[in-house]
Image (cartoon, rainbow, N blue to C red):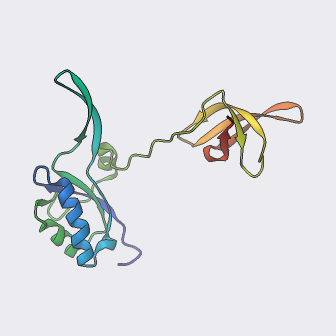
Amino acid sequence: MSNTDEAKWYVIQTRPNYEDKVSSAIMTVTAYHELENYVSELKVLKKEVEEIKNGQKRLVTKKLYPNYIFAKLIPNDDLFRIIANITGCSGFVGNPPLPLTEKEIKNFGIEMPSEIVVPYKIGDTVQIIDENFAGVSGVVKNLDLNKQVADVSVSMFGRETMVELKLEDIIPIN
């Protein structure tokens, strides 16, 4: 495998309710054939939904795309052949297997950024742990989760000054 090879997202079709079994088999079979380095990631996209059954609410995990596995693979003919022959696997989408476009990856929601949860909110008093302002406390005035920064108002030389800091450079004061 050369450094110029780049993993791409492919879609694997499975028999009904075989998504997890085929994903597990892919990891086992590729390890056996020493091709595990060609498999970067496997996803069966799911979400939790509230379901009402017999008057009772409960959380249920539903597959977003039943019968499909999204696989980030480094293209390799042997790998494609081995995966397509796994029991329960119907094969790849496309012949030869076609990688997803950037637009398709976005539309399917495959590479969703993880949701950022911060332990403070606007108006909270925080302590700065960034080396430039270590130990200084201030008040969060603005949070930008997309840029992963916070505007913090600190008192410096008797004046309120706004400082933009990375989210990980501040901690809440209890």
Residue beneath the point at 14% across and 66% down = 84
**Residue 89 percent location from the top left of the image:** 13, 60
The quarter of the image holding the N terminus is bottom left
Q: Give me the residue at 72% from left, 43% from top.
A: 128
Q: Is residue 73 left or right of residue 156?
A: left
> Vertical placement of 165 versus 6: above or below?
above
Q: In this picture, is 102 found above or below 39?
A: above
Report which quarter residue 167 is drawn in: top right
Question: Where does residue 38 sit, x and y in percent of width and height?
Answer: 31, 71
Residue closest to the eye, 24 or 42: 24
In front: 67, or 52? 52
Side of 122 relative to 19 (left or right): right
Q: Nearer the viewer, residue 133 or 25?
A: 25
Q: Position of residue 170 (x, y in %)?
A: 67, 43
Residue 150 left/right relative to 83: right
| Residue 101 versus residue 59 in the image, above or below | below
10 sits left or right of 167 in the view: left
